[in-house]
């Protein structure tokens, strides 16, 4: 049995109740297992077992008062996974599904994603099983304040820098940061995704989606192709999807389907600027977004949230983990999809990835293709330290360069004997080497 298999079995026994975490670790181990077997230095330092277990998990209760005067209680967490490359860095997710398994999988992925960005960032993740949907503005503010009251002493601009994720956008970041500032009396870059007037970076809201499209452009260029005219499907009209839709549309692609919380819309002519603006308006109201769009523009609407059986050239899943199942993958392969570029974290199930990797589809794993968000968060931290705000062009240019470099790194480490590129293996091996080398240098 290989070292990777032995360690995975141990982890499966210890954490059998954490399926998402085991899925992420198992995918990673199967990708780097052979490489690890050839590296005596890493085996001697037991890197694989050490790298798969978080440094620390903080969990706490978050009591808050609802608008009827009742006391509600949620669970809050911060998983500080690995900080050998820099302060722990990763978003906060507020969603009823949040638990330790999901946050450990996200934290684990974040360590390697952050390693790929070329910036000095460790990895972490956090959140709460709180559902912001249907809550009033004051309830959200009270929840965020209570959450920060419990977390503030365990974070800091050189220690751990949270950001947004599902359910945590600019509004929540404002309330969280406001409370942090009140408690510490410090205005420092301890949270990213801030508003522009209080320490935020230009391009941060769009960064993840833009980065996904920049990575896709690189993949296409490596195949002597370009994005113009390509039929794209994008799922989960949230922060990441919005940036990807905006940039892909700007570069001449045809967004033929978008999905969101209430279904998907199919527009063979392409969902262009005006419709995208309308979707944004709808999203701000917190209600259904897909059905009203379809009604206004007389488009095909399906209440199913999965658009994956529509023929397309490129699929960009941007909603959540495991949203592309084995069956969805079969549809995409059968219908001639050529590229799958992950905007969300682990949106393809284990079986789906296996099928995709054995097909002609070129596949980019989220830890490489969606790294643009955390990269610009890293740039926000740099701007905070400099007490300076860079121009839109300056940030966008750096983002583009980082995504180009991530693509080239994945290509270098993922090149196969037949000349094709396995981006998943490339991303995993390259990011692992960097973290593992530093772990060896720093000792146990
Ligand atoms: P948002 O909350 O802004 O958007 C997610 C959207 O997807 C919501 O509208 C949600 O609806 C919808 N959704 C959820 N599940 C499904 C589904 N099965 N089918 C269709 N739509 C669905 O989150 P983000 O855009 O910030 O994050 C999305 C993904 O990208 C996550 O995996 C996140 O970890 C990842 N990511 C985010 C980054 C960022 O910068 N924000 C950076 C890198 C990765 P509903 O609310 O009804 O569930």
Image (tube, rainbow, N blue to C red):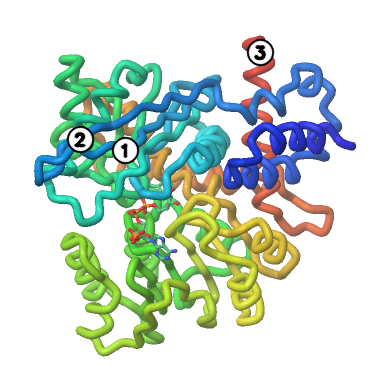
Q: Count residues near mark 3 (Cα–Cα under 10 Å), then give few for <14, some for 14-19, many for 20+.
A: few
**Badge 3 is on which residue?**
441
In which quadrant of the rendered view does residue 354 lie? bottom right
Q: Mark 1 and mark 3: span between their CA atoms?
A: 40 Å
Q: Where residue 189 sits: x, y (%)?
A: 28, 25
**Disc 1, disc 2: CB below 8 Å?**
yes
**Badge 1 is on which residue?**
74
Label 3: state its secondary structure: helix
Ligand 1 shows up in which quadrant of the image?
Answer: bottom left
- Which residue in the rendered view is the most extreme toward the right? 1
Question: Along the line of sight, which residue is nearer the eye, 170 or 339?
Answer: 170
Q: Nearer the viewer, mark 2 or mark 3?
A: 2
Q: Mark 1 and mark 2: span between their CA atoms?
A: 8 Å
**Badge 2 is on which residue?**
64
Q: Earlier in the sequence, mark 1 or mark 2?
A: 2
Question: Along the line of sight, which residue is nearer the eye, 367 or 56?
Answer: 56
* Observer able to see residue 68: yes
In which quadrant of the rendered view does residue 398 lie? top left
- Which residue in the rendered view is the most extreme toward the top? 443
Q: Earlier in the sequence, mark 2 or mark 3?
A: 2
Question: Along the line of sight, which residue is nearer the eye, 221 or 36?
Answer: 36
Q: Count residues near mark 2 (Cα–Cα under 10 Å), then give few for <14, some for 14-19, many for 20+.
A: many
* Quarter containing the C terminus: top right
Q: Residue at x 55, y 43 (%)?
A: 406
Label 1: state its secondary structure: strand
In this rendering, the answer to whether 167 lies above or below 379 is below
Q: Nearer the viewer, mark 1 or mark 3?
A: 1
Q: Is residue 42 left or right of residue 67?
A: right
């Amino acid at each position: 049995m290989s070292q990777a298999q032995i360690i995975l079995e141990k982890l499966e026994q210890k954490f059998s109740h954490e399926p998402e975490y085991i899925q992420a670790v198992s995918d990673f181990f199967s990708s780097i297992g052979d490489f690890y077997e050839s590296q005596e230095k890493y085996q001697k330092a037991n890197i694989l077992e050490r790298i798969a277990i978080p440094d620390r998990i903080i969990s706490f209760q978050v009591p808050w008062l609802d608008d009827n005067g009742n006391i509600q209680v949620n669970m809050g967490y911060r998983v500080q996974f690995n900080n050998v490359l820099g302060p722990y860095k990763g978003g906060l997710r507020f969603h009823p599904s949040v638990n330790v398994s999901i946050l450990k999988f996200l934290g684990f992925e974040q360590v390697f994603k952050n390693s790929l960005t070329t910036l000095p960032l460790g990895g972490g993740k956090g959140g709460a099983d709180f559902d912001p949907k249907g809550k009033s503005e004051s309830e959200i503010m009270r929840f965020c304040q209570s959450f920060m009251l419990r977390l503030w002493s365990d974070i800091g601009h050189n220690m751990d820098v949270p950001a947004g994720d599902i359910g945590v956008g600019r509004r929540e970041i404002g309330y969280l940061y406001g409370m942090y500032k009140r408690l510490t009396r410090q205005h420092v870059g301890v949270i990213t995704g801030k508003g522009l007037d209080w320490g935020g970076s230009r391009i941060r809201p769009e960064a993840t989606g833009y980065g996904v499209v920049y990575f896709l452009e690189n993949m296409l260029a490596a195949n002597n192709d370009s994005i113009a005219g390509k039929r794209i499907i994008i799922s989960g009209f949230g922060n990441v999807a919005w940036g990807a839709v905006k940039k892909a549309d700007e570069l001449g692609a045809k967004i033929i389907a978008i999905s969101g919380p209430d279904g998907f819309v199919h527009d063979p002519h392409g969902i262009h600027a005006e419709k995208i603006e309308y979707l944004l308006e709808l999203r701000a109201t917190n209600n259904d977004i897909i059905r009203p769009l379809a009604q206004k523009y007389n488009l095909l609407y399906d209440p199913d949230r999965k658009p994956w059986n529509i023929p397309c050239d490129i699929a960009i899943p941007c909603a959540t983990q495991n949203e592309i199942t084995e069956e969805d993958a079969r549809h995409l392969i059968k219908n001639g999809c050529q590229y799958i570029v992950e905007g969300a974290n682990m949106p393809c199930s284990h079986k789906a990835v296996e099928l995709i990797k054995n097909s002609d589809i070129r596949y980019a794993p989220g830890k490489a293709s969606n790294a643009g968000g955390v990269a610009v968060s890293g740039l926000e931290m740099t701007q905070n330290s400099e007490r300076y705000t860079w121009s839109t062009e300056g940030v966008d240019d750096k983002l583009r360069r980082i995504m180009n470099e991530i693509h080239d790194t994945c290509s270098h480490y993922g090149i196969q004997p037949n000349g094709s590129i396995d981006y998943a293996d490339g991303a995993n091996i390259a990011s692992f080497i960097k973290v593992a080398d530093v772990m060896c240098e720093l000792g146990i």
